[in-house]
Image (spheres, grey):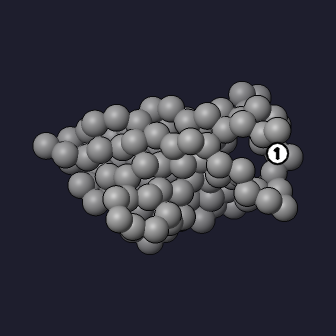
Amino acid sequence: QVQLVESGGGLVQPGGSLRLSCAASRNIFSFNRVGWYRQAPGQERELVAQIDFGGLTNYAASVKGRFTASRDGAKNTVYLQMNSLKPEDTAVYYCNAFNGRDYWGKGTLVTVSS
């Protein structure tokens, strides 16, 4: 059973930064891709950022240039560095891993508000 545990969410002012972490219970290179999704109240879950096995990244247009996804194989951890945060970035952020099926963390809440 794969476990993904997110951390790093919280309350931040507009323009601020946060770094989310996702600790996996197994080697992250055993997955085809890892990444982050988010779900705002009343909205569907959407892709934020992904890293494929080879290291190629893919970002939602709304976060490109502000968010950076990365991974540390030695720690089996995936990160999401979020800069220049906006109120519309407020959501529950979920870690995701895929290797023929999706695995999900329980999510961490990010609130961007003054």
Residue assigned mark 1:
29
Extreme bottom residue here? 61
Which structural element holds mark 1? helix
Q: Is residue 11 visible?
A: yes
Q: Position of residue 104 (x, y in %)?
A: 65, 49
Q: Nearer the viewer, residue 35 or 93?
A: 93
Count of residue discs: 1
Q: Position of residue 92 (x, y in %)?
A: 43, 49
Q: What residue type is labelled 1?
A: Phe
Q: Residue at 41% of width from left, 62% of height from top?
A: 63
Q: Is residue 84 visible?
A: no
Q: Position of residue 4 (x, y in %)?
A: 67, 38
Extreme top residue here? 75
Image quarter for residue 61? bottom left
Location of residue 14 with respect to 4 vertically, above or below? below
Quarter occupied by the N terminus: top right
Extreme left residue here? 114
Location of residue 65 with respect to 72 vertically, above or below? below
